[in-house]
């Protein structure tokens, strides 16, 4: 069931424990999401977070705060994927509060290469026995591969672990409607289920520059597999789109991946249309934000409806960037419901007069939607009631 805000709660913990698989400087959207949430909690309520990290980066970095010059949080990164050290760090973080509250950011493969973190439920039980309270944000649930795919062999154990974690949580949260339905099916202990958005991992614009003042550039931002899928499936349309928008550059932003020949083909095809293909690679969040805020539009490749669950789309919207949604070839839906928060390539290519107005309207609609449903402050409003105690 999807519950209303909990009744009988009201006290915000002095510190919030956030359990994350990875953290900076690793390129990990989940860790960035946790940091953005923690920073919003600090900014609004002066409550810092203790980040207990399963897979630490090397070397351990100095982490700047998103809301100021001083980093208010604590990080426990030196765990080296060791269960006992992870347990000790969680206990140490919990000792900082009389009633420790932990927000677990869960994905099955993040805590185990095989997706089978068999030790995690036991560790959470010990935390509960020591007086703690657990809320889980399910970013993913479990594998559901078909035989003979290797994920099929681990799907049963993964689902068992997911059910155990769900049962140990006082509340469960997800941004994905499909996951919410699956969680409801497995919710044996009738834990309250809540929905929350996904924010930008690269900051948020406070003032939106108009389209007329932006650089004629089309941004393709995200993880290497999603960007590669867009290029492989839609390169011809992307070239037409860049030409139609009078773009001078397509900016590829993110980890480079293993596809040098494809990059050569992209560069050649765009070059024939008079458009430069610039591979930026992974960039600091501030540089990504600056690049997005001065681009014409951002392109992504998602199935209908899933774009609202994407941190990349959240980043575009946070900077008022019109989102151009390409749909994967495997998406069999004949049409998507009209949505003012994004444009389709076909709609852009069909537009001739009034292109600037179209881009402005889509960027503004996405930005307003983001501010209301997906911004750092909005997500904190959605999550905070479940973290409180009586």
Image (cartoon, helix red, strand yellow):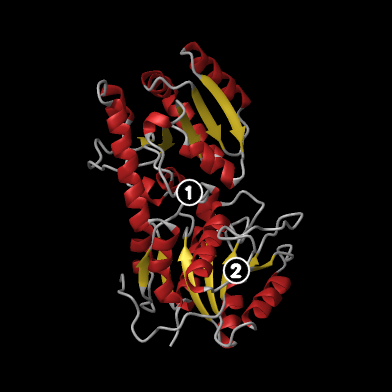
SS category of the residue bearing label 1: loop
Quarter of the figure with the N terminus = bottom left
Task: Please identify the residue farthest to the right as the structure is shown.
Answer: 59
Instruction: Left or right? Give the position of 94 relative to 308.
Output: right
Camera-side residue: 283 or 54?
283
Q: Residue at x 73, y 72 (%)?
A: 85
Q: Are marks 1 and 2 in contact (CB under 8 Å)?
A: no
Compared to residue 22, the image places residue 287 above or below, namely above
Q: Give the quarter of the image for residue 181.
A: bottom left
Camera-side residue: 309 or 156?
309
In primary-sequence order, the first of circles 1 and 2 is 2
Compared to residue 275, the image places residue 120 above or below, namely below
Instruction: Left or right? Give the position of 100 relative to 373.
Output: right
Q: Which residue is mark 1?
A: 147
Q: Position of residue 349 (x, y in %)?
A: 30, 23
Mark 2 neighbour class, 10 Å CA radius: few under 14, some 14 to 19, many 20 or more: some
Camera-side residue: 91 or 360?
360
Q: Which residue is mark 2?
A: 118
Q: Give the quarter of the image for residue 372.
A: bottom left
Q: Position of residue 83 (x, y in %)?
A: 69, 70
Task: Please identify the residue farthest to the top as the structure is shown.
Answer: 272
Instruction: Left or right? Give the position of 234 relative to 80.
Output: left
Q: CA distance from mark 1 to mark 2?
A: 22 Å
The image's mark for residue 187 is none
Quarter of the figure with the C terminus = bottom left
Q: Position of residue 320 (x, y in %)?
A: 39, 42
SS category of the residue bearing label 2: loop
The answer to whether residue 239 is seen in the rendering is: yes
Q: Residue at x 56, y 55 (%)?
A: 32
Q: Give the quarter of the image for residue 73.
A: bottom right
Q: Position of residue 222 (x, y in %)?
A: 51, 41
């Amino acid at each position: 069931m999807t519950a209303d805000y909990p009744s009988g709660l009201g006290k915000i913990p002095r510190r919030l424990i956030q359990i994350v698989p990875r953290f900076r400087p690793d390129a990990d959207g989940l860790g960035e999401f946790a940091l953005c949430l923690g920073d919003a909690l600090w900014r609004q309520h002066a409550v810092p977070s203790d980040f207990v990290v399963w897979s630490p980066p090397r070397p351990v970095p100095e982490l700047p705060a998103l809301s100021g010059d001083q980093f208010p949080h604590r990080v426990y990164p030196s765990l080296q994927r060791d269960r006992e050290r992870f347990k000790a760090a969680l206990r140490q973080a919990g000792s900082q509060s009389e009633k420790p509250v932990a927000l677990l950011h869960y994905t099955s493969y993040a805590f185990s290469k095989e997706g089978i973190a068999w030790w995690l439920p036991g560790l959470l039980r010990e935390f509960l026995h020591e007086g703690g309270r657990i809320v889980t944000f399910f970013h993913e649930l479990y594998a559901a591969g078909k035989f003979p795919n290797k994920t099929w062999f681990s799907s049963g154990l993964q689902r068992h672990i997911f059910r155990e974690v769900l049962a140990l949580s006082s509340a469960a949260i997800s941004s994905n409607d499909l996951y919410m339905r699956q969680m409801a099916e497995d919710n044996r202990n009738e834990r309250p289920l809540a929905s929350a958005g996904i924010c930008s991992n690269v900051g948020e614009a406070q003032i939106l520059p108009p389209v007329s003042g932006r650089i004629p550039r089309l941004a393709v931002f995200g993880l290497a597999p999603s960007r590669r899928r867009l290029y492989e499936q839609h390169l011809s349309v992307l070239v037409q789109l860049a030409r139609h928008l009078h773009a001078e550059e397509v900016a590829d932003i993110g980890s480079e991946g293993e596809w040098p020949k494809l990059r050569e083909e992209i560069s050649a095809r765009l070059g024939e249309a008079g458009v430069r293909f610039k591979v930026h690679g992974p960039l600091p969040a501030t540089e990504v934000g600056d690049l997005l805020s001065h681009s014409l539009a951002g392109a992504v490749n998602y199935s209908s409806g899933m774009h609202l669950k994407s941190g990349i789309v959240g980043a575009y919207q946070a900077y008022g960037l019109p989102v151009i949604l390409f749909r994967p070839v495997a998406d069999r839906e004949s049409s998507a419901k009209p949505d003012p928060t994004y444009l389709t390539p076909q709609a852009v290519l069909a537009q001739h007069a009034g292109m600037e107005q179209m881009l402005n309207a889509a960027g503004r609609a996405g930005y307003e939607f983001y501010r209301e449903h997906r911004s750092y402050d909005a997500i904190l409003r959605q999550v905070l009631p479940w973290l409180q105690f009586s």
